[in-house]
Image (spheres, grey):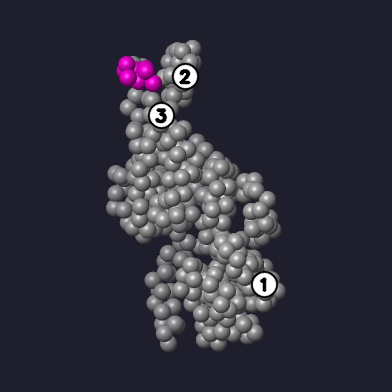
Amino acid sequence: MKLSHHNCKKQSQVSRRQFNTALASGTLGLLLKPSIMLGAPESIVVASQGGSEMEFHKTVNIPRFESQTGVKVKYLIGNHSDRFVKLRSEVPNPTFNVYFSKYDFVFQAIQLDLLEPVSADVIPGYDRIADRFKNEYSAGVVYTAEGILYNPKIMDKPDSWGVLWDPKYKGKVGLSRFVDRNLMIASLYATGGERIDAEDEGWEALEELIKKQEAKILPGSEQLGQMFEQGEVVLTNFWQARATTYKRAGSPVDFSAPKEGAITEHWAYGIPKGTKDELKTLAGQYIGIAISDESAIAYAESAGYPSAKPDVSYPPEFRDTLLTPEEFSQLKSPDYAWISAKRDEWTNRWNKLLTS
């Protein structure tokens, strides 16, 4: 192996004995930072959404990665749909190396063979991710549970999805704008927690919720805390992480995981198919940092989302916001193949239900 004079100068962090031993044994690449190695990339590109998500990358993940590797991070900002379209149009010659998105988009990428295989050999910490949040092509980073958000000043903690259909709360029930999530909840309610994909029963229950219960379609997550404060809603289906945020802000909101099972939503990383080996190695290192305990704790404290690794040890003030082990074991995971095949049909039916 030949090293240029420029690269030899950069071995100052490695002792001469270590350097010579590694050079003789052929393990120099394990000893030196990637940026020191001959021909190593100078940068990688991370595709993520903007706003607070990118700020977290810039303040927590990127500095650690650049410090550990000497490789710079550039980023591609766009919404979930835009990043998916770019991934699909560029593979097998991607211009970005780390793909981050909600799992329904990651699932579609896997179905279209757009991602490289990953494992613990590629991503440090991969083996600690809960099985429900990882597979051969993606690594979950954070998740939340969709359960019941309720006003504890007005009602006791509910234990079933059925409370959304209780006539006592007619006109005070909120309902998210996501038809697939609503249909899964209605299916669990209608089948006593037995099925998440009972369409006929689910649509019948949804119609009752809209027509008889006069459920209010939520305009967005930002307004929900205020709707609780003003008494517009008393309970709704929504994310546990949001309940944590609202509660911290002083809104009268708490969370309950129904006995039929809360429903997961998670976000995951993948590596675009066609990524060159040296970039794939760096992409795996970046993802490893992003799913590390240090990043997980910082993310939980800033946004309320727990890690996809269930064994992370959080500060005491955050532990009370987590699902119990029993609640975690009862989580229901969406059937993404079913959702993907039915989404357009459901959207049309949902719009008709709301306007009829």
Secondary structure beneath disc 1?
A: loop
Amino acid under label 1?
A: Pro
Crowd class of label 3 (few under 14; some 14 to 19; many from 20; radius 10 Å): many
Which residue is label 3 attached to?
Answer: 34
Query: In the rendered image of this protein, does residue 187 appear above or below residue 36?
Result: below
Residue nearest the viewer, comparing 312 with 276 = 312
- Tell me the residue at 49%/47% (across/down): 139
| Residue at mark 2 to residue at mark 1: CA–CA distance | 59 Å
Q: Amino acid at mark 3?
A: Pro
Q: Magenta residues?
A: 3-10
Q: Chief secondary structure of the magenta span? A: helix
- Residue bearing the label numbered 1: 152
Pair 3/2: label in front? 2
How much space separates mark 3 and mark 2, taking CA atoms?
13 Å
Q: In which image quadrant can residue 155 be found? A: bottom right
Dot 2: element: loop
Q: Quadrant of the C terminus?
A: bottom left
- Residue located 56% across and 56% down the image: 304
Residue 145: image location, x then y, percent: 58, 61
Residue type at numbered disc 2: Val
Residue at left 47%, top 19%? 14
- Residue 4: image x %, image y %? 31, 18
Closer to us: mark 2 or mark 1?
A: 1
Instruction: Return the x and y of residue 194 as percentages of the image width and height.
Output: 62, 69
User: Where residue 26 appears, x then y in whole percent?
Assistant: 43, 18
Q: In the figure, 89 relative to 214: above or below?
A: above
Tag 2 residue: 14
